[in-house]
Amino acid sequence: MYIFNLLKEFNIWRKVRAVALENKEKLEEAGFRVDWVGRIYTVINLPEEVVNQPFSREGYVLMRLREYDNLFLNMGIADYISPELVDLEEAEAYLLILSPDNDYIKFWPFMFSVLKTTGLIIGLRLIYLLISRYWNSLISFWNWLT
């Protein structure tokens, strides 16, 4: 169900945020910054030989990210964070954002789940009201059938 996945994702986000804020000094020494949401980010400048090769740009950034694997493993968040790359074309660099996945912490999936749950509750309530109101008629109809 959506609510269980949402709660699981929220707990992962909360843990990653707490670890990132707790280890903020270590991350800053490695060149990363932490924002108030708990995302870890840095800018990786591309060397001249990579700038001229358009197909190797993202590969270079991910290769540079491998240098920090032990840092994230020691913090215990390596399994939970995933990279997002934003191309900074005017600076010949990439903004690397590390954050937990957020498939369920989004507005529209949440609203769809709330509407679906509300419809289910209203439908069950209507069925209950109909059965409680016409219970005697339903019993007599059942007796007539059998």
Image (spheres, rainbow, N blue to C red):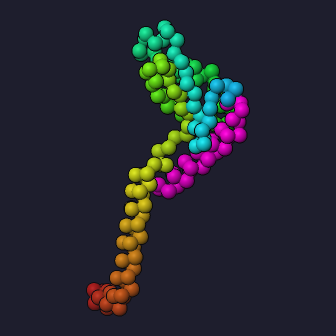
Residue 61 placement (x, y as % from top left): 52, 21
- Horizontally, residue 110 falls left or right of residue 61, namely left
Q: Is residue 24 magenta?
A: yes
Tell me the residue at 36%/77% (across/down).
126
- Horizontally, residue 48 falls left or right of residue 125, namely right
Give residue 56's quadrant in the image.
top left
Tell me the residue at 48%/11% (across/down).
50
Give residue 123's quadrant in the image.
bottom left
Comparing 87 with 91, the one in front is 91
Q: Is residue 81 visible?
A: no
Q: From which residue to which does the magenta span run?
A: 1-27
Q: Is residue 17 magenta?
A: yes
Residue 109 placement (x, y as % from top left): 41, 52
Give residue 22's quadrant in the image.
top right
Furthest toward the front, the residue is: 90
Residue 67 placement (x, y as % from top left): 63, 21
Q: Examine the rendered structure and indicate whether residue 62 appears above or below residue 138.
A: above
